[in-house]
Image (cartoon, rainbow, N blue to C red):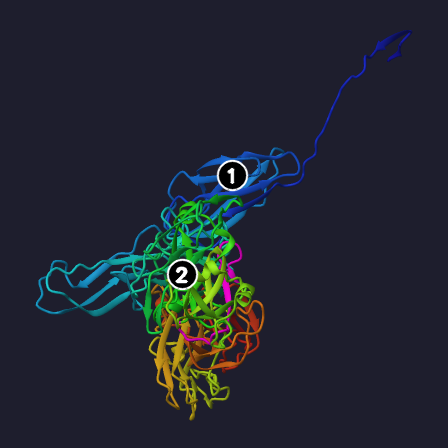
Amino acid sequence: MSTSVPMGNSCTRWRFSPPLWALALYADTFSPTLTLVAPPDGALLNTSTPTLELEYGDIGSGVDPETLSFQAGGMELAATCTQGEAGATCTPTDALPEGKILLTTTIQDYAGNFAKPVEVYFTIDTIPPAIILTAPIDGTLTRESVQLFVGSLSEAASLTLNGEAIFLGPSYEFSHGPLLLREGTNTFELLATDAAFLYTGNHPIQTGVAPGTIEPRRAAVLRGKVFTRDGLPLSEVTLTVLDHPEFGQTLSRADGMFDLAVNGGGQLTVYYAKEGYLPVQRQLQVPWQDYAWLPGVVMIPLDPQVSAIDLTAATDFQVAQGSLVTDADGMRAATLLFPPGTQATLMLPDGTSRPLSTLHVRATEYTVGKSGPQAMPAELPPNSGYTYAVEFSSDEALAAGATEVQFNPPLISYVENFLNFPVGGIVPVGYYDRAQKGCWVPSDNGRVIQVLGHNNGMAELDTNGDGVADDAATLAALGITEAERQRLAPLYPPGQSLWRVSIAHFTPWDYNWPYGSPDDAEGPGQGAPSGDDPLEDSCELSGSTIECQNQILGEAAILAGTPFSLHYRSDRVPGRKAAYTLEIPLSRASLPASLKRIELETSVAGRRFTQSFPPAPNQKYTFTWDGQNAYGRTLQGTQPVTIRIGYVYEGVYQQPAQFARSFAAFSGVPITGNRARQEITLWQEWQGLIGSWDSQAHGLGGVEPERAPCLRSLKQGALPGRRRTAQRRSFGPSYYNDSGERYQWL
């Protein structure tokens, strides 16, 4: 391009060569996003250098990782970070101080836009609690046969003595015992654990919890206890949640107890496992922000008796038998018959399979003795009465971690009819799918048969209860061959009745008849427990607030310079136990004749109190709570309490429903004179509140305005009513301004 520019009498020509200038501008006005994944808000950590996990992103120029910054308590916090495109994992360079920490973090993009600062509060507590033992003194020589343990802790914690929990007083003091001493040296171990938070820090009790998994608003703690068949506590049992690997795992302690933190709000299946023992599963509904108790569990070792089975060249039935079992219900032994030509397939967790030609088979019965119901592989369906359960297993499958062993054709299981069910009747059969579904699955019915005699080396069998040996065609319709009868003859004498069941795979198998309660059985039908339930109109007098009928004294003090006043009430002083006491009705004037006993369960703050009562009329029980939770800490405000009253009866077996698969199906027709192996309990449940607010620890006579735990905001409302019901949750003192409007922490 050229142009001419006149300059006086002359003309100057300028020539330009395009382009003269190239300019590109990129506008980025959007701030990057930033999320602090861990630690969660409100966490209690036992490490002073917690891992900080962040996620960030930007739709414009991109996040500049070098601009990531932290502040702790308003001061710059140096940290070492491993950074990626979408997030970073950081560790503070210096230890954070003890106590509550406000952590703030932000980041910029390459255009200089700041992300909105993210704040989170957490508490650092790395100092273990100290045990101050007043008595006894270590190394003491005593002539007494018992010893009382007296002392205190330096802070709120849980305390155990040789694995047994010790309850603490309001100032963390304890007095436990007296305990019996044996002749010679007696060794005791006191262990104090500041374990309110189970799954964080350098040495958490619950390991493998994915960061950010436990949501504070949904958090719950599962508690339970594991025993051996002999009733002894079982330690080192691994507890996990089926299909929820993000919750990690925990171990049972020396006393068999365990605590497992999860998210509440649904049904979870807890998996119990220990090497050398059969695994167990238990299901329960888990609430939010509360404790949930699992029933006591008994874990049993594998049957020591092993049968070697070679499938490669067998031409006759091979036999595998478990140990002979004897209890109050009779004698029996689980027996498996392997038909000639049986093929076994090992099913592996990754979905693959492989053939198995040699097996070392065990048959371990769960349903032995009084602890049998607690030892079951899982809780039974409601209509299925506890009868008989056995685990068929092979050492090869256990070593390979297989989910099951499948057989073609199916094996035949026999067990003595030790409960004398009618010959020719149905045997309801189901198996427990612990690997995939975590539930019981109905299978084809079995049959009660009887060996009438032996003829030409074969067992003569009655399969319909007519007392006559069945012909070959009748037996063939049930899949019973002459080869099977030949193998039965040396195993069972004439007159022996048996349960015959087809087994297609190795898992826990259950042969359970339906059951019900006696005809006259009734539930408790009791009214609600009564406690500290103030009246609305209590004849309030002038001057100091005196509620005559409620026996409560109140007083108000104006806060100078504010529109508020503090209100004192004597029903919130520590010495008054009315708010911590419930009177629980247990029985009416008349009771069913078949009632065996009355059970009472009271659950509050992670603790469970159980008691049994005789079947007597007009009984009541007074329950008083000490205000402490499962870890020995005194709680503030009213707490949820659950009371369950159970009327216990002997169960009555019923005839199986007439289905091809009758397992867990209800019939309602009792088997006359056949007492079930399981009691049946009809429960009544009541939920309410117990406890009160106590501000005495703040040093202002119990009237200091203090925000209660887990409370969120200050709300304004109408003047309060005086009657407290199970639906109202009173957390702390109320505050009134001069206009009579009430303000209370809710």
Q: Nearer the viewer, residue 703 or 653?
A: 653
Q: Which quadrant of the view contains residue 593?
A: bottom left
Q: Which residue is mark 2?
A: 335
Mark 1 vs mark 2: in front: 2
Rendering coords of residue 738 (x, y %)? 53, 75
Q: Which residue is mark 1?
A: 88
Rendering coords of residue 729 (x, y %)? 49, 73
Residue 97 horizontal side relative to residue 88, left or right: left
Task: Give the total number of marks visible in the rendering.
Answer: 2
422 part of magenta stretch: yes
Q: Quadrant of the N terminus?
A: top right
Most distant residue in the front direction: 456
The mark that comes first in sequence, 1 or 2, is: 1
Q: Which mark is residue 329?
A: none
Estimate how packed mark 1 is, as few (under 14), some (14 to 19) or many (20 or more) residues with alpha carbons within 10 Å: some
Q: Nearer the viewer, residue 336 or 486?
A: 486
Q: Nearer the viewer, residue 590 or 40?
A: 590
Indicate the amino acid at tag 2: Thr
Q: CA distance from mark 1 to mark 2?
A: 59 Å
Q: Is residue 322 visible?
A: yes
Rendering coords of residue 391 (x, y %)? 42, 59
Instruction: Give the residue at x 44% y 43%.
Output: 51
Q: Is residue 287 visible?
A: no
527 part of magenta stretch: no
* Residue range (magenta): 418-441
Most distant residue in the top direction: 10
Q: Secondary structure at mark 1?
A: strand
Q: Secondary structure at mark 2?
A: strand
Q: Are marks 1 and 2 in contact (CB under 8 Å)?
A: no
Rendering coords of residue 107 (x, y %)? 55, 39
Residue 491 horizontal side relative to residue 562, left or right: left
- Depicted 457 relative to depicted 114: above or below: below
